[in-house]
Amino acid sequence: MKATKVNLANLPTPIKKARFLSKELGVNIYLKRDDLTGAEISGNKIRKLEYAFKLLMDRGYTSVITTGGIQSNHCRATAAAATMLGLKSVLLLRVNEEPKIEGNFLLDKLFGAEVRHCTPEEYKTSRNEIMANIAKEKSAKGEKCFVIPEGASFGIGSMGYFEAMEEIVNQEKELGIMFDTVVLATGSGGTYSGLYLANKYYNLQKRVVGFAVCDDSNYFKNHIHNINKEALQFLDKEVELSVDDIEINDKYVGIGYAISREEELDFIKYVASNEAVVLDPVYTVKGMYGLYNEIKAGNFNKSKNILFIHTGGLFGVFPKQDQFKF
Ligand SMILES: *Cc1c(COP(=O)(O)O)cnc(C)c1O
């Protein structure tokens, strides 16, 4: 890899066996605890941001702008990382109505981020344009403002999960376990991209499965393929890319991004009460619920040791507290 990073996350994150789920499903399921990358910066986004921030600071940027939903883990981690590094942050957050200051959004405010709002329609059609305009506005005031795309899912961000796969390979040696299958929730594609690239680069031959939490499989295959192409410039060796070996399962999106079905919230309770691991309602529950059902359906019969990446999101549980049934 040709890219370098700033060190912010607690790495390597531990790998622990999910005893209850392994026993119930009759296959070894391990958790890569990327929800433990930090407190303020917890979750998967910080791995991508370590590389993005290094690049933008090297280029003399003094502030960052990024975007996501009102409860975005990515925006919260970006705001925290910016403050840690002495940079300013602007967050363009998608909202329907006046949002309650809770969960990740509360933390954004605590970290001192400047918050702007946009409607779901604006987000869909013109978020990058809006961010470019904010960057221009800031530069008129003497700031040099770098635009980080949604989820930090772009070429340099992928290097964070390229490195995570290297970390996994080292842990395989320490633990004496080979993970033949890697499973994760996919929302903007960068996490999948990094894992995919390292899988190819080192010819690890792992099955890497992303469970979509929005959009559909075709959308993600193309989107991830584009991120992969952009990321190649940071690798020191050619990697053969193909859209066809990107595996995205879109059967567990449910009723939409960040919207929970009762069975998903019940599954959070089920896993927490038996495993003492809390899945988040937006990403990891859809990924794990998908994996659970697909194992039961026989679609992981060739897997012996499955590594599920717990990508974080704990703060997203609290704004949903009234929807749980006890
Ligand atoms: C963003 C996020 C994901 C998805 O990662 P992408 O790289 O955006 O696909 C998964 N889990 C959590 C908790 C996240 O915040």
Image: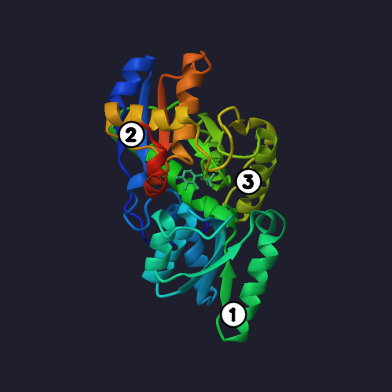
Few, some or many C-alpha atoms within 10 Å of disc 2 (few <14, some 14-19, many ≥20)? few
Mark 1 near ligand 1 (CB under 8 Å)? no
Image-based side of 63 in relation to 21, left or right: right
Q: Which of the two labelled residues, at mark 2 and mark 1, occupies the earlier sequence position?
A: 1
Q: Residue at x 57, y 86 (%)?
A: 142
Above or below, comparing residue 282 to residue 56 in the picture = above
Q: Residue at x 31, y 32 (%)?
A: 272
Few, some or many residues within 10 Å of mark 3 (<14, 14–19, 20+): few
Against 101, residue 145 (above or below) is below
Q: Is residue 103 visible?
A: yes
Q: Is residue 67 above or below residue 86?
A: above
Which residue is rendered at x = 45% and y = 53% of the image?
73
Rounded to the nearest whole Å, what is the CA distance between mark 3 and mark 1? 38 Å
The amino acid marked with disc number 1 is Lys
Residue 241 can be seen, yes or no: no
C-alpha distance separating marks 3 and 2: 26 Å
Amino acid beneath label 3 = Glu
Earlier along the polypeptide chain: callout 3 or callout 1?
Answer: 1
Residue at the location (34% across, 37% down)? 278
- Residue 166's x, y, as percent? 43, 43
Which residue is more in the foreground, 91 or 65? 91
Instruction: Say which quarter of the image contains residue 97.
Output: bottom right
Image quadrant for the C terminus? top left
Q: How would you rate the neighbour count of disc 1 (Cα within 10 Å): few for under 14, some for 14-19, many for 20 or more?
A: some
Image location (x, y in percent) of residue 26? 37, 14
- Residue hosting label 3: 238
Residue for badge 1? 138
Label 1: element kind: helix
Q: Which residue is mark 2?
A: 173
Give the percent coordinates (x, y) of residue 211. 54, 33
Q: Nearer the viewer, mark 3 or mark 1?
A: 1
